[in-house]
C-alpha cells in the first residue's frame, strides 16, 4: 500500500454470503468498491496542519489519534477522488477473474489445487495487498470489472442477490 500514489486505484474485496429466506447460502469473494487515490498522508506521527486535517478529520485513524496521542504512530491514510465509489452490486471475484489478473509472488498464474476450495485459494492469494503494475493487467482488470458487473447485474434483475 505504501507504493500507492495519486491516480492509483485501490479496490476493496469482501467475503459475502447470500441471505435468502433468513438462511445464509453460498459465499464468495466480491469487489465492493474502490477509490482512486487523490492524496496520500504518509507516516503520520503528529497532528497534521489545519488544511490537511480538514481533508482527513473524519478518518478513523486520525480521530483515534486525536483522542489518544499514542496513536500518532506512523499510519498512512489515503483520500479518494470524486471517481471513488461503492458498487451498487458487489462484483464476483472468482477463479475466472483471478486467472485473468492475479499472479503469485513469482509472477506466475495462480495454482489451483484439488485439496483446497476455490474460496480458500482466493482467500490465501488475496490476504495481502496485490499491486497490478503492468498496464495490460490493469486494462484487463478494468475490462473484467465491467464484464462481471454487467453479467451480474443482469442476473440480479431477475432475483435478489448480494448488495453492498
Image: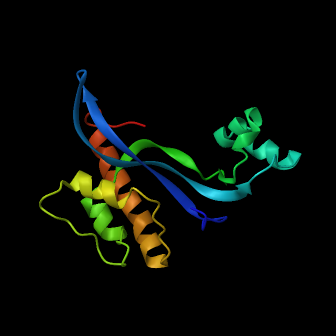
Q: Residue furthest front?
A: 70
Residue at left offset 40%, top offset 58%:
146
* Residue 91 visible in rendering: yes
In the rendered picture of this protein, how many numbered marks are placed on residues? 0
The residue closer to the viewer here, 84 or 146, is 84
Q: Residue furthest left?
A: 114
Residue 79 coordinates in the image, percent (x, y)? 67, 51
The residue closer to the viewer here, 117 or 86, is 117
Answer above or below: position of 154 versus 141. above
Tell me the colour scheme of the image: rainbow
Q: Which image quadrant: the N terminus? A: bottom right
Residue at left offset 33%, top offset 40%:
16
For this view, does 35 lie left or right of residue 106?
Answer: right
For this view, does 100 lie left or right of residue 114?
Answer: right
Tell me which corner region of the image, top left, top right, bottom left or bottom right, holds residue 18. top left
Residue at left offset 42%, top offset 73%:
137
Residue 20 coordinates in the image, percent (x, y)? 24, 27
The residue closer to the viewer here, 25 or 49, is 49
Tell me which corner region of the image, top left, top right, bottom left or bottom right, holds residue 109. bottom left
Residue 50 coordinates in the image, percent (x, y)? 87, 45
Residue at left offset 43%, top offset 37%:
164
* Residue 80 visible in rendering: no
Q: Residue furthest right?
A: 50
Residue 45 coordinates in the image, percent (x, y)? 76, 52
Q: Residue furthest top?
A: 22
Amino acid at each position: 500500500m505504501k507504493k500507492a500514489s495519486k491516480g492509483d486505484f485501490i479496490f476493496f474485496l469482501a467475503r459475502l454470503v447470500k441471505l435468502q429466506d433468513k438462511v445464509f447460502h453460498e459465499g464468495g469473494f466480491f469487489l465492493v468498491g474502490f477509490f482512486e487515490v487523490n492524496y496520500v498522508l504518509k507516516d503520520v506521527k503528529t497532528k497534521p496542519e489545519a488544511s490537511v486535517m480538514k481533508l482527513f478529520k473524519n478518518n478513523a485513524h486520525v480521530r483515534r489519534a486525536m483522542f489518544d496521542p499514542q496513536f500518532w504512530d506512523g499510519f498512512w491514510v489515503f483520500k479518494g477522488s470524486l471517481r471513488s465509489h461503492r458498487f451498487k452490486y458487489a462484483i464476483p471475484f472468482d477463479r475466472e477473474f483471478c486467472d485473468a489478473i492475479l499472479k503469485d509472488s513469482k509472477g506466475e498464474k495462480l495454482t489451483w489445487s484439488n485439496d483446497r476450495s476455490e474460496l480458500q485459494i482466493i482467500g490465501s492469494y488475496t490476504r495481502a495487498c496485490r499491486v497490478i503494475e503492468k498496464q495490460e493487467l490493469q486494462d484487463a482488470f478494468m475490462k473484467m470489472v465491467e464484464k462481471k458487473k454487467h453479467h451480474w447485474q443482469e442476473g440480479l434483475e431477475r432475483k435478489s442477490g448480494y448488495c453492498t
